[in-house]
Amino acid sequence: MPLKPSEEIIAATFGVASVVGVFSKMTPNTADVRTDAVNGSNNPSVHSSIRSASVVSAAIVSGIALLAKSPAVFVAGGLTIVILAAADMHANAVSSATGRPTQAVGE
């Protein structure tokens, strides 16, 4: 039995809140990553923590979407994962010295 639209919104909000919570606990603060002068840009530990948070978030959102039988939950959670991962990966790729993306580790 599909959810009512008001219940879909609640389930989607729960999924989005779960993703935000996972990213806030499993990844470093985006501002700290961007201004990290010690480790520089393209830090492999930050990259692996972003990937781990993305995988855990995807599992949680998939579970909620399957239980709710709602594609809206999957879409809202998936978009949140993509947005947060892209923001964190961009912050990790930007050099704190030049403010431009780099390809080398530690620049």
Image (cartoon, rainbow, N blue to C red):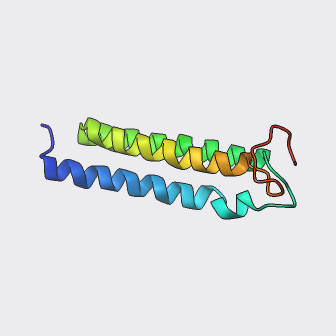
Q: Give the image quarter of residue 86.
A: top right
Q: Residue at x 50, y 41 (%)?
A: 82
Res 64 quadrant in image: top left
Q: Nearer the viewer, residue 14 or 82?
A: 82
The x, y position of residue 48, in whole percent, is 70, 44
Estimate the x, y position of residue 104 in percent, counting from the top left: 86, 39
**Residue 101 located left or right of residue 73:** right
Residue at 87% of width from left, 60% of height from top?
38
Asked if residue 27 is positioned above or below residue 82 in the image, the reply reads below
- Describe residue 37's horizontal placement relative to residue 99 as left or right: right
- Looking at the picture, tell me which residue is in the foreground, 91 or 73: 91
Q: Is residue 4 left or right of residue 50?
A: left
Can you say which quadrant of the picture contains the N terminus?
top left
Residue at (85%, 61%) from the top-left corner? 37
Residue 28, x across and y down, in percent: 67, 60
Residue positioned 76% across, 62% down in the render: 35
From the viewer's side, name the closer residue of 98 and 10. 98
Q: How many marks?
A: 0
76 relative to 38 in the view: left or right: left
Spot occupied by residue 69 in the image (x, y as percentages of width and height): 24, 37
